[in-house]
Amino acid sequence: MIDWEAFRGYIESAGEKARKHTRKSAAGAKPIDAVLMFKVMVLQHLNNLSDDRIEYQIRDRLSFMRFLGLNLEDRVPDAKTVWQFREMLKKQGMGEALFKRFDDQLAAKGLVAKGGQMIDATFVEVPKSRNSREDNAKLKAGELPEGWDKEDPATVHMVSQKDTDARWTKKNQETHFGYKNHINADAQNKLIRAYEVTAASVHDSQVFDQLLDHSTDEDGQKRAAYADSAYRSKEQEERLLSNEIESHI
């Protein structure tokens, strides 16, 4: 249903703007097709996969390769390439706009919000980091923790691999390190209408209000809200009632 080529000019213009602020050498591998990279991101979000896992799954699943238009001998984007592409879109402020264009195409095909709104969160695991809070704070500020030598190539490599935004959390006696994808999906057609990404330590309920859709249908009614007990509180129920949103938490 999606006209993927409609995204090409928009994504490539973002890439051109990003390259103006980086080196202009023609050396190195040829960039992977912009539309293919966007389709990789769609697969990643639909299947809740980290950068490392999407690289593995593309190589492993024929269905993923077919969706991307890749043959077995074709070059597959690695985890770093996926990360760089996402960072490029983020720095150019184009992630939300791409999501909106994707949504508009679905709406044109009749896949609009029809049912209630289901709000939930899932963990996205990342390679574990053993930094202390103090070390993370210094790394995020562009400083090196005590005892780290900036002249040591091993230190430079280690810093580039550190994820200073991921956090630890515990749920049902299981420990997780990474992030949370918070989504609002339509209850009838299951399409994601809104999303937020936070560190894993952020409680589900803290993002509920940001995801809530207050739009009304042709009868002036707002969509009912569905969520599990992690979102339940007296204050939340009162807010939904005051906003005329039926609660099915």
Image (tube, rainbow, N blue to C red):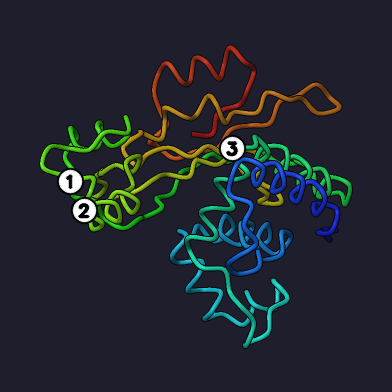
Q: In the image, residue 179 lies at what x, y percent?
A: 39, 45
**Residue at 60% in and 65% down:** 27
Mark 1 residue type? Asp
64 relative position to 124: left or right: right
Mark 2 residue type? Asp
Q: Are marks 1 and 2 in contact (CB under 8 Å)?
A: yes
168 relative position to 94: left or right: left
Q: Which of the two residues, 159 or 186, is positioned nearer the viewer here?
A: 159
Q: Which label sits in the foreground, 3 or 2? A: 2
Q: Earlier in the sequence, mark 3 or mark 2?
A: 3
Asked if 78 appears above or below 218 in the picture, the reply is: below
**Residue at 63% in and 31% down:** 224
Q: Which residue is mark 3?
A: 91
Disc 1 and disc 2: Cα gap in Å? Answer: 5 Å
Q: In the image, residue 226 lies at what x, y percent?
A: 55, 37
| Label placed on residue 152 | 2
| Label placed on residue 149 | 1
